[in-house]
């Protein structure tokens, strides 16, 4: 609450875990998307590019098959026209970042870039990750750690889990009828957890995610230290795209790589009638993290049990309602 840690709970198999060394790590799935996007926020603040620059200006190969005018803003707002994960990397080869980005460069848009909103569940991370590498001239993971992880003290957050931490990661389970099936089995694999998949395999804790969102609520600072400017945060969390999603018809509001709140159905995980100024991102069937500048609350809720939409929507919404009620928000 307003940058101060107020509630910090965790558990495994029905019992609390106490020591810092035993803190549980979770696969956060898409909860990592805003943290990946934050690398671009920092680069934009440094004046390295503009949001409406073509992706191909920094990644020339991306211009193939009619993508020469696709902009960085369109990538960050899920309007790049490349929502489908290419079959060669839709599975155990998902961790092959070089192959994935090559396939993205060679791909033909499924519709005119900029013409529709459709969630880029996995491809978002390859597009953002490669843009970071091309603009920063550094590996994505190295740049993320230097400009986001280290300044914010996210000591338990990884894009690519170190091999020695395997025993701390909660094993994913999956309810019957999950669509698409097999996510738990895939993301439990060491080769997938140890790979860099910016849209899908962040390994983290609720505490670290809440710290990230608390810093955004406070305009880019935490514990008296600033990692990004207030204007850059305001720009990233302002509306940049709004409309009915091409795939499910629900209203979506997007900042730059981060979802925005309000009373629309797409913001269900923030609880009913969340503030339009709130920002958030969920993780496939499991998790939610958000911040609300109006209330000053930042929260993260991570689980290892993948549930279907009906159960998961109520689970996440209920948790957010409970947190808001506890603070009278």
Image (cartoon, rainbow, N blue to C red):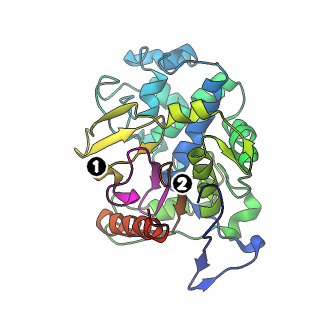
Q: Is residue 242 above or below residue 109?
A: below
Q: Front-most of 46 and 309?
A: 46
Which residue is at a point 41% across and 33% down the rendered structure image?
77
Q: In this view, does 48 lie above or below 260?
A: above
Residue 70, visible in the rendered structure: yes
Image depth: mark 2 or mark 1 in front: 2
Task: Give me the C-alpha separation between circle 2 and circle 1.
Answer: 21 Å
Residue that protrudes farthest toward the front in the picture: 328
Residue 81 sits in which quadrant?
top left
User: Tag on residue 296?
Assistant: 2
- Magenta stretch encompasses residue 278: yes
Instruction: Locate the N terminus by quadrant.
Output: bottom right
Mark 1 residue element: loop
Q: Mark 1 points at which residue?
A: 264
Left or right of 284, for residue 12: right
Please state the horizontal and vertical placement of residue 116, each as a whole percent of the image.
29, 30
Please state the horizontal and vertical placement of residue 216, each as a whole percent of the image.
58, 45
Please state the horizontal and vertical placement of residue 91, each as a whole percent of the image.
48, 51
- Magenta stretch encompasses residue 288: yes
Is mark 2 in CB contact (under 8 Å) with mark 1? no
Mark sitting earlier along the chain (2/1)? 1
Residue count near mark 1 (Cα–Cα under 10 Å), binned few <14, some 14–19, many ≥20 = some
Q: Front-most of 225 and 19?
A: 225
Please state the horizontal and vertical placement of residue 133, each as a whole percent of the image.
65, 28
Residue that protrudes farthest toward the bottom in the picture: 14
Left or right of 200, for residue 252: left
Residue 197, visible in the rendered structure: no
Residues rendered magenta in the picture: 268-290
Instruction: Locate the C terminus by quadrant.
Output: bottom left
Q: Front-most of 320 and 120?
A: 320
Mark 2 residue element: loop
Q: In this view, does 273 lie above or below 125?
A: below
């Amino acid at each position: 609450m307003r940058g101060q840690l107020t509630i910090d709970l965790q558990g495994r198999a029905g019992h609390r875990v106490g020591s810092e060394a035993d803190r549980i790590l979770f696969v956060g799935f898409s909860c990592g998307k805003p943290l990946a996007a934050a690398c671009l926020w920092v680069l934009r603040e440094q004046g390295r590019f503009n949001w409406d620059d073509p992706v191909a200006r920094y990644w020339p190969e991306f211009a193939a098959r009619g993508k020469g005018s696709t902009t960085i803003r369109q990538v960050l707002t899920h309007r790049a026209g490349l929502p489908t994960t290419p079959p060669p990397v839709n599975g155990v080869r998902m961790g092959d970042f070089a192959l994935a980005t090559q396939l993205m460069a060679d791909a033909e848009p499924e519709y005119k870039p900029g013409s529709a909103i459709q969630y880029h569940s996995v491809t978002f991370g390859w597009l953002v990750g490669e843009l970071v590498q091309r603009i920063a001239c550094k590996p994505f993971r190295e740049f993320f750690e230097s400009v986001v992880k280290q300044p914010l003290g996210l000591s338990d957050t990884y894009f690519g889990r170190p091999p020695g931490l395997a025993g701390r990661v909660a094993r994913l389970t999956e309810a019957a009828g999950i669509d698409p099936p097999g996510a738990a089995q895939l993301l439990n694999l060491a080769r997938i957890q140890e790979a860099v998949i910016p849209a899908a395999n962040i390994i983290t804790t609720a505490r670290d995610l809440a710290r990230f969102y608390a810093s955004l609520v406070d305009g880019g600072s935490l514990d008296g230290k600033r990692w990004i400017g207030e204007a850059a945060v305001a720009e990233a969390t302002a509306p940049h795209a709004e409309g009915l999603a091409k795939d499910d018809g629900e209203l979506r509001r997007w900042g730059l790589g981060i979802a925005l709140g309000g009373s629309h159905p797409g913001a269900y995980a923030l609880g009913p009638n969340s503030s339009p100024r709130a920002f958030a991102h969920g993780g496939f069937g499991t998790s939610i993290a958000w911040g609300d500048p109006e209330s000053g609350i930042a929260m993260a809720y991570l689980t290892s049990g993948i549930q279907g939409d009906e159960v998961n929507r109520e689970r996440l919404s209920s948790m957010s309602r409970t947190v808001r009620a506890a603070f009278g928000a």
